[in-house]
Amino acid sequence: MPFIQIEDSILSFRLRRSLRAKRLHMVVKEEVFEVVAPLKTSNREILAFLKQYQGWMRKQVRQKSRTQSVTKMSWPADFLAGEYIPYRGRWLRLNVKFNDRALMECHEDYLTIMVPWRHAFGGLSQYVKKQIWLWYQQEALNAIKDSIDALCPKLGRWPRGYQLKKQKTRWGSCGISGKIYLNWLLILAPVGALEYVVAHELCHLFHRNHGKRFWAKVASCFPEYEQQERWLSKQGSALISLSSF
């Protein structure tokens, strides 16, 4: 998909040349900016048109950010500026910029990805997707470590290790060796959901079943566990649908 860099922002669009078009115009079609141009319109005219409408395009992006549903999850067709990705129960708008070095910066409602200039000439979407995947993995590991550090002093026991897994049916598991495994998709869920699953698996260090003593142990270290159980039960299928990243 083509894109245009205006100042420090990158806006992606789809260009369609039409025999019937009398003038340049733009529409939002299937959540994509589509520029419709007469056949003989030059690239210079199209560039000038895009610069003229950059403010309108940014306004549409902001409106989408406010109205996007957290529970209706899907990956974008292209990982380019203006698209959205789920993270910790909210949506982040991708802000792609070219720079001399690669860098990721997460803000409240957007994720800035600095892309080396060599990727401007091909494979931009795939490069951004790979960087997001690596960022998700590191963020998940950091969040799991923080949860373990907060919960284990209360429990008086620590796991022998922890690891991310790509799973389609389970949120986590606790191995016989005392190592816990967590589904990487939990980094997309609200903060409390990941914390609950970590607490759940840590409690299996004491009880290998789901009996009364197990749930009492869960409640002792994570009192609001029922709320997170309900969220995962209701929204878990939408989260699992994102497993084929």
Image: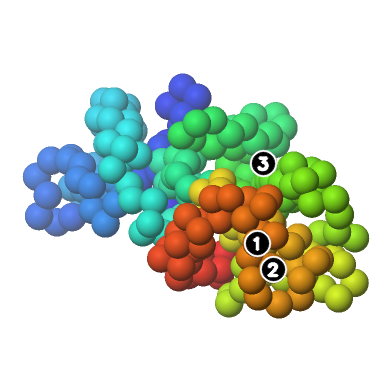
Q: Position of residue 155 (x, y in %)?
A: 79, 51
Q: Quick check: marks 1 and 2 in contact, CB under 8 Å?
A: yes
Amino acid type, label 2: Arg
Of the residues tagged 1 and 3, which is closer to the observer? 1
Task: Find residue 133 and report its horizontal and vertical position in percent.
Answer: 64, 54
Q: Residue at x 63, y 44 (%)?
A: 119
Please give the name of the residue rendered at 70% of the width and 60% of the height, measured from the top-left corner: 217
**Numbered disc 1: secondary structure:** helix
Residue displayed at 58% across by 75% down: 168
The residue pinned by badge 2 equals: 213
SS under mark 3: helix
The coloring applied to the image is: rainbow
In front of the other: 161 or 226: 226
Asked if the residue at tag 2 contacts the one at tag 3, i.e. Cβ–Cβ closer than 8 Å, the answer is no
Alpha-carbon distance for marks 1 and 2?
5 Å
State the residue position of label 3.
118
